[in-house]
Amino acid sequence: RRKSTLPTFDTLQFRYEVLQKLGDGAFSNVYRGADRKSGHVVAIKVAHKHTEEDASGDHLHPSMKKKPRVTERANILKEVKIMQNIDHPNIIRLNDFMESQENYFLVMELCNGGELFHRIVDLTYFSEDLSRHIVGQLAQAVYHLHEECGVVHRDIKPENILFNAVPWIPSEYPKRYPFDDVTKKDEGKFTPGIGGGGVGRIKLADFGLSKIVWDAKTATPCGTMGYAAPEIVTDQTYSKGVDMWAMGCVLYTMLCGFPPFYDESISALTKKVARGDYSFLSPWWDPISVEAKDLIQGLLCVDPRKRYTIRQVLQHPWLTGSTMNKSGFV
Ligand code: ADP
Ligand code: MG
């Protein structure tokens, strides 16, 4: 058998050994690696540098012209700057940043358990308990970003939510299952990723599209001090809503195994999203609690002013486990 060949990255490989490809995103390839000094395993995101030749798009296959795999310097530096300022158990940590002639390298903590996306595909759908376990952690991450860092992620989706370690899946899946209780006593069977943490711990990755909407230190809108037009202030406030909408889509998809909005045609899909045209299809949604449906409705609300904020999500009965009073929700 032919030995698999990995690309060489001189600047990087002086300090880190590149071991194997983990995934590829729209703008990068991500590899498993190891720190040559400490032996610690890491994840290394390699983003190709933007060059004049790339900019023309002439070197690309026609199908790729709209999506060149190149990265603007300002964009990658922004991603690095945002990640460097974040320290949260449910958000991927950035350990190191390097660049060579051709590439940027983001050295991050490794998440061994793969994408939430793949776990949904494996299981068809998640139980409410497992979904709560995931969304609860995601909500903690988003609370930290929105309320403590002034950052909007803007690309929350199952591909960017990673399991710290390979989660243990009960063989009877798919079935409504108290995932958290069951995993605790089985924790020893698994090798948690670097940084420890329990089985089933998730971390939010990919700050490539994220944006700082206010300065965390002064709690003021970015670059504006009293001169900001209302639409800018409004935009900064409601831009957080994009993450809330995305959380609604993630939760919906976890609970039934298909996304809330789907159409073969992009233009039809766009219209459905704009109208908030989704439904709780029978029979898939029949056994799901009214609390879960209420949370989804609050998140997939077309008017961003009425959409749930992260604070409302954290207080929502579906997450806190408190039962709703009868008059509360239809
Ligand atoms: P892009 O901006 O190109 O989408 P991502 O940061 O999302 O890049 O990384 C692409 C993919 O690489 C992810 O969807 C995931 O599968 C994998 N990946 C990214 N970061 C890590 C990590 N820290 N540990 C393990 N896998 C990762
Ligand atoms: Mg990604």
Image (spheres, rainbow, N blue to C red):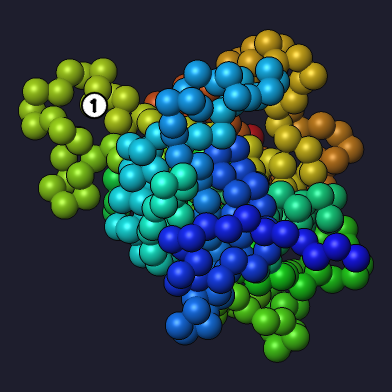
- Identity of the residue drawn at 46% across and 55% down: 105
- Looking at the picture, which amino acid does disc 1 mark? Val
Q: Dividing the picture into quarters, in which one does residue 135 lie? A: bottom right
Q: Position of residue 325 (x, y in %)?
A: 57, 49
Q: Position of residue 298 (x, y in %)?
A: 54, 35
Q: Dividing the picture into quarters, in which one does residue 259 lie? A: top right
Q: Looking at the image, can residue 167 be seen?
A: yes
- Identity of the residue drawn at 29% across and 37% down: 213
Nearest the viewer among 150 and 77 is 77
Quadrant location of the C terminus in the rendered image = top right
Please tell me how crowded label 1 is: few (under 14), some (14-19), or many (20+) other residues with Cα within 10 Å. Answer: some
Q: Quick check: 110 above or below 240?
A: below
Q: Quick check: 292 above or below 4?
A: above
Quadrant location of the N terminus in the rendered image = bottom right
Q: Quick check: 31 above or below 274?
A: below
Nearest the viewer among 102 and 27 is 102
The tally of labels here is: 1
Nearest the viewer among 237 and 85 is 85
Which residue of the protein is positioned furthest toward the left in this rendering?
226
Answer left or right for 256 relative to 206. Answer: right
Q: Dividing the picture into quarters, in which one does residue 11 lie? A: bottom left
Answer left or right for 5 relative to 106. Answer: right
Q: Position of residue 219 (x, y in %)?
A: 17, 45
Element at label 1: helix
Q: Looking at the image, can residue 298 be seen?
A: no
- Identity of the residue drawn at 84% across and 55% down: 122
- Identity of the residue drawn at 63% across and 24% down: 60
Q: Position of residue 296 (x, y in %)?
A: 61, 39
Nearest the viewer among 324 and 141 is 141
Q: Quick check: 281 above or below 253?
A: above
Identify the residue position indicated by label 1 in the image: 233
